Amino acid sequence: MKKKNWLIYGGIGLLFAMIGAYAATLKPQPSAPVQALYAQSLPDASGTPQALAQWKGKAMVLNFWAPWCAPCVEEMPELSQLQKEQAGKNLQVIGIGIDSPSNIAEFAKKFNIAYPVYVAGISGTELSRQFGNKAGGLPYTVLIGADGQIKKTYLGRLKFEQLRADLAAM
């Protein structure tokens, strides 16, 4: 009788393990470009390497930009304002600069940017393409949910009323 009970308990335990493994596959995993982003470490404007995995679990407004791109520069004050408004909430604005470290450092010193800016150099163009920027144009912004899923992309200067509506819908 004891051996029979062990078999029943073992079978029940195995069933629950299988159910748990199946449930784990249902949880949305970050999309491939977001996983690639989290795997990177990029220098910030001061040259200090930063792991981008630190933003895992937060919704993100990921903005690809360059100091020589007029629409990029024009939208930065509004992105800074958005970051200030969202302080303490589960949203982070991040800038990925596509230029030399010295140009981005000089730009960051000149302008008061309220969100982290990282230096990707020319490889930032390839990273933006992984997020769907087939044209390679700037600015290019990606709205990423806290679950690591790409919610929307924007090519060109942001329309902030649309971005705010998209954020509210998340």
Image: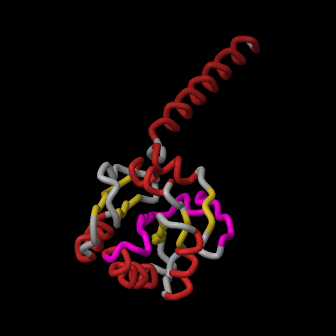
Magenta segment boundaries in residue numbering: 47-70
Q: Residue at x 58, y 60 (%)?
A: 52
Point out residue 42 in the picture as x, y percentages from the top left corner.
61, 61
Q: Nearer the viewer, residue 137 or 24?
A: 137
Q: Residue at x 62, y 19 (%)?
A: 11
Q: Residue at x 51, y 77 (%)?
A: 115
Point out residue 86 in the picture as x, y percentages from the top left corner.
44, 79
66 on left or right of 19 = left
Q: Quadrant of residue 78?
A: bottom left
Q: Colour scheme used in the picture?
A: secondary structure
Q: Residue at x 55, y 58 (%)?
A: 56
Counting the numbered discs, the total is 0
Residue 28 appearing in the image: no
Q: Nearer the viewer, residue 81 or 27?
A: 81
Q: Quadrant of residue 109?
A: bottom right
Point out residue 64 in the picture as x, y percentages from the top left corner.
42, 64
Q: Quadrant of residue 16?
A: top right
Residue 112 appearing in the image: yes
**Quarter of the image containing the N terminus?**
top right
125 on left or right of 154 = right
In this rendering, the answer to whether 143 lies above or below 44 is above
135 on left or right of 81 = left
**Quarter of the image containing the C terminus?**
bottom left
Point out residue 137 in the picture as x, y percentages from the top left corner.
32, 59
Question: Residue 121 colored magenta?
Answer: no
